[in-house]
Amino acid sequence: MFGLLIGLFVGMWALQIGLTALQLKHYKKTVQEMSKRSSGYLGVGVDKRKLGVGSVVILVCNKDGIVVDSKKMYGVTVFQRFSHYNELIDKHIDHIDLREEDKLYAATQLAVKNIKTQINTI
């Protein structure tokens, strides 16, 4: 019985590793696709929590700071995938108005900060 429990634990652990690898592959593919624009800036924001729901926001803006593409991922499982974040399209990065209680607030703020860092270094 004890051997069966250890075998089950090892099997679930291996499954978790495999599914995490698939999610990481999806993340890299999404970032790579969104970075193919000829000009503009890409910002990624990650709000990772030890306990609770994490989120990832990827923003692409043009040289004027207008968001031209955005994707979001929100959840606690490795089955989550990116979806379009249409609420931010056509907004200037200085005028994205999310409330702090919004589940994507921290990730969006970090993505905007990363874009502003790129803009200020050029």
Image (cartoon, grey):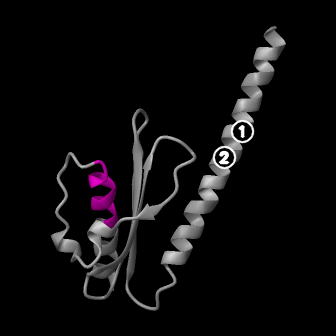
Residue 18, placed above or below residue 96: above
**Residue at horizontal 60%, vertical 56%?**
24
> Which residue lies under the disc numbered 2?
19
**Residue at horizontal 71%, vertical 46%?**
18
- Magenta part of the chain: 103-111
Amino acid at dot 2: Leu
Q: Which mark is residue 91?
A: none
Residue 102, x across and y down, in percent: 24, 49
Residue 22, x across and y down, in percent: 66, 54
Residue 105, x across and y down, in percent: 26, 54
Dots 1 and 2: beta carbons under 8 Å?
yes
Is residue 105 rendered magenta in the image?
A: yes
Number of numbered markers: 2
Rendered-image quadrant of the C terminus: bottom left
Residue 64, placed above or below residue 109: below
Rendered-image quadrant of the N terminus: top right
Using residue 77 as the reference point, say whether residue 58 is left or right of it.
left
Using residue 52 as the reference point, say whether residue 36 is left or right of it.
right
Crowding at label 2, few (<14), some or many (≥20) Cα neighbours within 10 Å?
some
Q: Which element is circle 2 on?
A: helix
> Which residue lies under the disc numbered 1?
15
Residue 116, placed above or below residue 20: below
Q: Which element is circle 1 on?
A: helix
Q: Quadrant of residue 60?
A: bottom left
Is residue 44 rendered magenta in the image?
A: no
How far separated are the C-alphas under marks 1 and 2?
6 Å
Amino acid at dot 1: Leu
In the rendered image, the residue lying farthest to the bottom is 38
**Residue at horizontal 38%, vertical 80%?**
41
